[in-house]
């Protein structure tokens, strides 16, 4: 399951994806599963996660843009949506403020899967941009670190 979560996370940052055209791997079972899980969602596009068996749909659901990740059989694996930093659970927010004092939160993606909910928080600190993978117990790790040039 950790491999799947890692693929889902990589997808969020525009890595290892390709467009999946209607009729390629997007079956009627997959379409039905999406509509059952997210009734009334407007499908923006289907894509696949590199060479894995996972597909995801970018959708507009309840006026929010989100991604829903499915296996080839139509089972929902995870979903993700952008949320405001103010919507982070208090323990996550407090932990991030303690570990990364003075950093600015740029965006937050909330991921929900069977094992629970976690958050990908992009922060800027000095000349670095970091993506922190945070969990509801307050634990976290640096998922990705990039040096910001031109500052």
Image: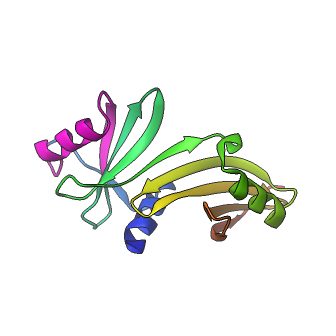
Indicate whether 3 appears above or below 42. Answer: below
Which residue is found at the position 78% from the left and 57% from the top?
94
Q: Position of residue 67 (x, y in %)?
A: 40, 45
Q: Give x and y (percent) for residue 148.
A: 75, 60
x and y, in percent, of residue 129 in the image: 72, 60
For image coordinates 65% across by 40% down, the residue present is 84
Q: Quadrant of residue 33?
A: top left
> Image quadrant for the N terminus?
bottom left
Q: Name the residue rendered at 84%, 55% in the picture.
A: 151
Whole-percent x, y for residue 131 in the image: 64, 61
Q: Is residue 40 left or right of residue 121?
A: left
Residue 14 drawn in magenta: no
10 and 39: which is toward the camera: 39
Q: Quadrant of residue 18?
A: bottom left
Any part of residue 149 in sight: no
| Residue 85, above or below 18 | above
Q: Provide the residue span drawn in magenta.
A: 23-47
> Would you say residue 32 sits in the magenta stretch?
yes
Residue 144 visible within the image:
yes
| Identity of the residue drawn at 47% across and 60% down | 116
Task: From the viewer's perspective, tell me whether residue 149 is left or right of residue 29.
Answer: right
Q: Which of the pair 125/94 is nearer the observer?
A: 94
In this view, the residue in front, 19 or 95, is 95
């Amino acid at each position: 399951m950790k491999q799947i979560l890692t693929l889902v996370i990589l997808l969020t940052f525009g890595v290892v994806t390709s467009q999946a055209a209607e009729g390629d791997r997007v079956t009627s079972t997959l379409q039905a599963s999406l509509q059952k899980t997210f009734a009334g969602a407007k499908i923006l596009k289907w894509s696949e996660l590199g060479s894995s068996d996972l597909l995801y749909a970018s959708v507009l659901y309840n006026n929010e843009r989100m991604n829903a990740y499915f296996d080839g059989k139509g089972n929902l694996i995870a979903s993700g949506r952008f949320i405001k930093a103010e919507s982070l659970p208090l323990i996550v927010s407090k932990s991030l403020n303690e570990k990364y004092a003075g950093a600015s939160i740029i965006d937050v993606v909330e991921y929900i899967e069977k094992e629970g909910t976690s958050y990908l928080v992009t922060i800027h600190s000095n000349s670095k941009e970091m993506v922190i993978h945070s969990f509801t117990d307050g634990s976290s790790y640096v998922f990705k670190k990039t040096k910001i040039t031109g500052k």
